[in-house]
Amino acid sequence: MIKMENGKWKMENKLKKSLSLCVSAVIFLSFAFSVFAQETPPKPSAPKIVKVPVVKEKKLANGLTVAVVERKNVPLVTVQLLVKSGASSEQMTQAGLANMTASLLTKGTKTRNATEIAELMEFLGGSINTGAGWNSSSVTVNIMSDKLQQAMGVMSDVVLNPTFKQEELDLLKSQTLDNLVYNLKQPGFLANYVASRYSFSEHPAGGTPASIENISQVDIIAFHKNNFNPQNAVLIFTGDITAVQANALAQKFFGNWKKPESIASRKKNLSVIQVEPRQTMPKRILVVDLPNSGQASVNYLNRVFVGRSGRDFYPASVLNSVLGGGYSARLNQEIRIKRGLSYGAGSSFAWRTNETNFGTRTQTKNESAAEVAELVLAEVRKLTDSSVSSDELSPRKLVLTGDFGRDLETTQGLAGAVSELYSFDIPTSELNAYMKNVQTVSDAQIRDFAKGNILGGDLVIVGDYAIFKDDLKKRFPNRQIDVIKADELDLSKTNLRK
Amino acid sequence: MRKISAFLSMLVFAFVLSQTAFGQVKILPLNIKQRTLPNGLKVVSLRDNSSPTVSVHVWYNVGSKDDPQGRSGFAHMFEHMMFKSTKNMKSEMMDRLTEDVGGYNNASTWDDFTNYYEVIPSNYLETLLWAEGDRMVNLNVDEKNFNSERDVVKEEFRQRILANPYGMLFGQYLEKLSFTTHPYKRPGIGNLDELNAATPQDANEFYQMFYRPDNAYLIVVGDFNQAQFDAWTNKYFGKISRPTDAVGRVTQNEPDRTAEKRHMMTAPNVPFPAVAITYLAPVSKSADVPALRIAETILAGGESSRLYQELVYKQQIAQEAAFTADIRVDRGLLYFYAIASEGKTPEELEKSLLAELTKIQSSPVTINELAKAKNQLITRTLQEREQNDGKAIAIERAVAYMGNPNAVNTDIQKLQAVTIADVQRVMKKYFTDKNRVVIYYQQEAQKQ
C-alpha cells in the first residue's frame, strides 16, 4: 500500500500515466515567435502508421469464448480470464463481495493451499492477480512463454476448484478492514468512498467496514457459483503465442469447465431515465471533515445517464481529454500550471453499462480548498457555454489516441483493452475503429454532450474543515453546506452518519 | 489456523525445476551504440523499429544529494523549472512537442541523478533533439515561474508527505535518521522552510554548475535511422560549449555506524504503528550488490516470500512486511519495514523481522528459493523490455549505478551467477547489530 519504486522515494515531475507506443498523426504545428533571434524547432517528418492488432476469436463447446492477440517481440504471455460480473452484482449490505471472491480464488483449491499456489507461480517467475471492478472480475497471469503450460494448470485450478476456506476468509477480512482504516485517513480515497453513495447511489466496490464484516463463506461460494461459468467468461491470450497454441491450451485447461445448469441472465439495468437538464451548480455541497489532514481533496461528481457501448462514449472521452485527461488539460492548466495550487488535477469517466460516473479530482492545501472548488466548477461550466477551438481540440484527441496506442504495446495492456470491450459486449473490431472514432468527434458534439450531462453534480470536499470553512461560506453564499465528521461516516445510513 | 510451510511443496518443484532452471527463454543483449561528442556529451543509441515511436532520455549527473546547503529539495524543484521557458521555447512548450502530438514527457529527480524523457511518434525525433539541446543551455529562470513552481512543489510535498499517513516515515524520517554525514540525510523532497528560502539566483547557479554536456548522457531507443540520428545529435548538441570549471561533487562519506540507534517518531493520522530497521548498504558498484538483490527477492518478492509468509500470513501481525535494497551510488540503505495489523505493536514487528534476519543469516536459502528469485528477476527484465522506454530506463540505470551503459548487458549475468553461499555471506556482512537503526512510527498523542 505504500508505493515506492526500486525502493526509492522517487519524485516525478508529473503524475504518471500508463507507460508507453505513440501514435503518429498528421498534425501541423505552427509556432508563432515574435523574437527575431529565436530558433524554431525542426518540423516533423512524415508520420508512420500504428498497427492495431487483430483479435482472433473462437468458442469452446462449453460456451467459453477464447480471444487471442499475437505479439512476438518479447517471450512473454498474458492470459486473462474475464468474468462478466463484478461489484454491480452485489448488494450494499455485502459491498466488497465480488472483490473478496476474486481475492480468495488463489487462497486454496482442492489440491493446493494458498502458499503452494503463490510458491508455484512465483517459482515460474510469473504472477497471478485476481480482482473485481464494477462491471467484471478477472484472473490474470503474466508469464514467460516457455512456462505457460504450468501456469495455466494453476490458473484453471484456482478458477474451477477454489475451496474458500473459512480461515482464509477470516484473514482476508481482517486485511481488508485494516486496509480500509488506512485508506479512510487519506482525503482522496475518502472523497471517492463517500461519493459512491452520495453522488452515484452505488456502493464502494471495495466494501465498507460493516459490509466486509457481513460477508460469509456461504455468500462467497454462491457468488462464485452464480457468476464463474464458461458462458459468462472470456479467456484472453496476448503476446508470444499463436492462436492454434492458445486454443489448444484453452481446451486442455478450461474445456472441462461445466456449463451452469441454468443460465443466470446477466444483470441488466434497463432503466432508461430521461433527465431534465440540471443546471444548479453545484447541486449540493458536502464536506467530510478530516481534522489534521495534510491536504484537502476537492471533487466535482455527477451521475451521467449514458453507457459505455452507446454513441456518447467518444464525445465524452474527447470532452474528458479537454477538461482533465492529461497534463495539459484545462483543469491542470488552471490549477497547477497557472496558479501552483496543486500537484495535479484531472477528471475521468468510470464507465458503466447504462449510467456512468463522472468525476474531477485534485488535492490542495486546506487553505485553498474553496478557491480550487470555484476553479473546478468554472471549468465544468465553460464546456457547456463556449466552443473548443480546433487548435485545442486536435492535440487533445492525439493525447487519447497516443495513450491508446501505447497501452497496446505491452501484453498486459493489450489484454486489458480487449478485456474491457468484452466486459461491455462490444465487438473487438472496435479496437481498430478507436482512433478514427476519436478523430471524428466535433466541437458541437462535445458541447451538446456537456449541456445534457455534466451540470448539476455535487461538490465534495474532504479536508480539515476548520481551515477552509469561512472561505467556503464566503465563496458559496446562501448555499447549504452539509458537513460530516470523518469518524462519524456510515455509508449504510441514508444520512451517511453513524 | 492450519500449519502452512513455504517449503512443503518441494516435491512439486523437483519436476518444475528440471524444466525451468535452465529455461529456454533467453534475454537477448541490447545492441547499443556509444560515442562521445567533443564537448563531453555521451550518446547511447539503440535501434528498434517494432513500433513507430522513439524514447529520448537526457540524464544528468546531479541529484538530490547535490542540493545546495540550506536548500534541501532544490534539485527536484529545479527539475520543475526545466519545463519553463528557454531562449527559444515558451513555458510548457515541451508539452506542445510531446503530449500534443500523442506522446508524453516527464522527469524525475533521484538521490543521485535527474532524468528528462519523452516518448514520441518517431517522426518527431529531430524536433525533440532540438528541444533537449535547447534546454540544456538556454533556460530562462524568471521570478514569476519560479514562485509558481515552488507552490506546485509545496503541494507535492503536502500530497506525498503530509496527506499520506506513512509519508513522514518513508519520505522524511527514514533518511534523516539513517545518515549522519552524507547529504543523503536530507530528504530529496525537501521541506517547506528550505523550499521557501530558495531564489532564482540559486537556480541560475545550479544550472550553470550541473546542466552541461560533459555532465550528461543522451540515450535514445526506438525507430530511427542511425546516420540521421548521429547527424542531428551533432547539429543540436555539438554546438553547446563545454564549461571550463569542474563539476562540484559530493565529497562526504557516510562513516560506519558504531552502535545501534533507536528512534520513536510520531505523526498525525497514523492508523497503525510501523517499524523500519535500516542498515548501511555498500555502494552501487560493489560486487555484493547482485547477492543483495537476490536476498531482497527471497525476503520480499511476492506472496511466497519469507516476510509475507511469516509476518502477514502465519503470524498475522503485519498487513505489509518488506525488505528493500535501496542501493545508491554512495552508501545507501538496506531496510526492513512492516506496518502492523490491528492491535499489534511495533515491538512484535521488530522481533519477527529480526527473527527472519537471523534465519537467513544462520541457515542457507534453498536451491528452490534461489531459482525462484532468478526467474522473477528474468521476468521483470523481460517486462521492462516490452517497450522502447523500458529499454532506455534500463540503459540509464546502468549509466547511473555502474557508470557504464554496457552494464545493461552484464547485470543480468551477475544475478544469474549468485550462489547460495553468496546470499548467506552478504546477509552476515552488512546486517550487524552495530550497523542497525530502528525507527518506530506511531500516531501522535491527541491534542487536548
Image (spheres, helix red, strand yellow):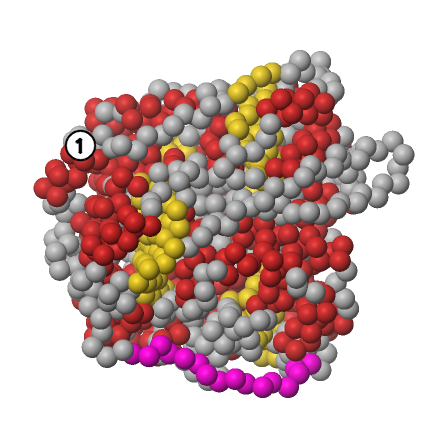
Locate residue A197 relative to residue B107 in the image: left or right.
left
The kind of secondary structure the magenta stretch mainly shows is loop
The amino acid type found where label 1 is placed reads Ile
Judging depth in this view, the residue of A143 and B300 nearest the camera is: A143
Q: Is residue B235 visible?
A: yes
Protein chain holding label 1 = B
Q: Is residue A214 left or right of residue A470?
A: left
Relative to A397, does residue A70 appear above or below in the rendering?
above
Give the magenta range: A264-279
Residue B112 visible in the shown view: no
> Is B86 in front, or is A77?
A77
Q: Position of residue B436 (x, y in %)?
A: 34, 33
Q: Quadrant of residue B302?
A: top left
**Residue drawn at point x = 33 percent, y = 79 percent:** A265
Residue A395, percent across and down?
Answer: 69, 52
Residue A403 within the magenta-colored segment of the rendering: no
Any magenta on residue A268? yes
Q: Residues within 10 Å of mark 1 (few under 14, many from 20)?
A: few
Q: Which residue is mark 1?
A: B367
Q: Is residue A404 above or below residue A387?
A: above
Mark 1, secondary structure of its residue: helix
Residue at image point 76% right, 30% down: B138
Residue at coordinates 69% horizontally, 37% vertically from top-left? A45
Q: Residue furthest left?
A: B11
- Residue at 64%, 52% in the rendered image: A398
**In this view of the protein, which residue sits in the foreground, B10 or A300?**
B10
User: Residue A432 location in percent, x, y?
Assistant: 52, 56
Q: Percent from the top left, x then y, of residue B444?
A: 45, 55
Corner quadrant of residue A397: bottom right
